[in-house]
Each structure stands twice: as C-alpha cells, then as structure tokens.
Amino acid sequence: MMNNMSKKQMILMIGGLAGFLIIACFVVGGGELAFDTVIREWFYSLRNDVLTPILKVLTYMGNWQSITILCILLLFFRKTRVRYGIPVSVGAITVTALNKVIKIIFKRPRPDVSLHLIDQGGYSFTSGHSITSMVVFGMLIYLVRRYVKDRKKANLLTVLLAIPWIFIGLSRIYMGVHFPTDVLGGWCLGLAILMVLIAMEERYEKRAGLPH
C-alpha cells in the first residue's frame, strides 16, 4: 500500500500517526494535561443559550445513527453508490471498529459528569465523533473535489462538508464529554486512516478502470 501513496499522502499519514502516538503517550501518563485544562475552560466560558443548541445539532451529526443514515442514503442512490457510498461506508466501519479497540486499550475516563451538557457514557480517548468526522467528511470532500466538475458547486460542497468535519470535534469539548487531547488524537489518527483509504480508493479506481 505504501508504494501506491503519493508523497503528500505519505507525509500526511506519517504526520497524523506521529501526532496520535505523541498524544497517546501523554494520555498513558495519566492525569489531566495543562493543555486540556486551559482549552476546556476557554470552551466552557463560551457556553450560552444561543450557541449550545447549535453545537448540540453539530455533535449529533457525528452520532453513529446520523453517520449510518448518511451512508445508507449514499448507497441507496445509483449515482452515488459506487463513487461515494462504498468508500464512505468502508471508512465509517473501519474507524468505528478501530476506535472501539482504542478506547478499551486506553480506558481514559471522561471529564466529570457535572460538566456534561449531554448524556454520554463509555471511555474518552479517542473521540469517536472526531475520528469518524475526519474520515467520513474528509473522504466526502476528497471525492467531491475529484468528481464534481463544476468548480463552483465543488467549492460550495467543500465548505458545507468542512463545517461538520471541523466543528463536530470541537463540539465534543464544548459539550464537556471529551478532553481536547481526545479530539486532537481522533483527528490525527483519522487523518492517517483517511490517507490510507484514499490511496486504496485510487488504487481500486485504477484497477477497475473507472473514469475520473
């Protein structure tokens, strides 16, 4: 697989993996990092009656139910099934399974329940919403840039997809259910996985002779 990756993809994959491993080492050390404390307190200071409902919607967009519905819709329609549905669904399944294993390995407790704005159980590291949004919406952005010929339409879709791509992870800190390092760790590992999945997609397209 390494031989099929471009130089840029390789750099991003290695960088994402390295970032995840560095953060994981700090998490293994136990306790709350100063970085986590400062960032969390800043996010909590932003809480208000206008922003909270908006970020709740965004955080729910990263729930497994929402991602499942998105994948089903992409798979249902013939025009989106092969180019979008299959790659996005494979990515969603891959990161969901991997993140469950990671959570069991690290067993990091979540922030104190008194800080939660939504009900959330399970372990904290890494943020499943963050890693999933990185892969799912990152893959969609890649596919849109690749297949949508109308550049104005592609740019608009890119902006719309970038909103959940970025803000789902940030919303998890705001909601008080994750540490910032949970989100950063999820983004880093998600980026590495995304690069591998993109390389696999390009390899499949080449072998299948699919038009670009």
Image (tube, rainbow, N blue to C red):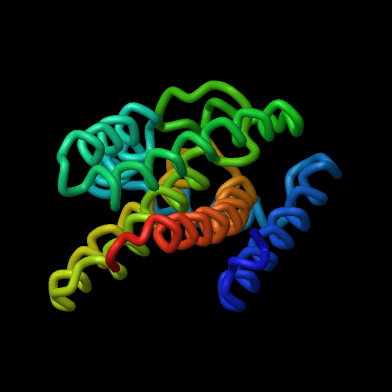
The x, y position of residue 42, in whole percent, is: 51, 57
User: Given the current orientation, which residue lies at the most extreme right position?
Assistant: 29
The x, y position of residue 212, in whole percent, is: 29, 68
The x, y position of residue 169, in whole percent, is: 46, 49
Q: Could you tell whether 137 is left or right of 150 in the image?
A: right
- Could you say which quadrant of the image residue 81 lies in? top left
Residue at left offset 39%, top offset 47%: 87
Q: Does residue 144 appear in this view?
A: yes
Q: Does residue 111 appear in this view?
A: no
Residue at left offset 44%, top offset 40%: 90
Question: In which quadrant of the rendered image does the N terminus lie?
Answer: bottom right
Front residue of this view, candidates 121 and 86: 86
Residue at left offset 25%, top offset 37%: 75
Q: How many marks?
A: 0
Front residue of this view, candidates 51 and 15: 15
Front residue of this view, candidates 104 and 205: 205
Residue at left offset 27%, top offset 40%: 57
The x, y position of residue 52, in whole percent, is: 30, 43
- Could you say which quadrant of the image residue 187 lies in? bottom right
Q: Could you tell whether 107 is left or right of 71 in the image?
A: right
- Could you say which quadrant of the image residue 124 lies in? top right
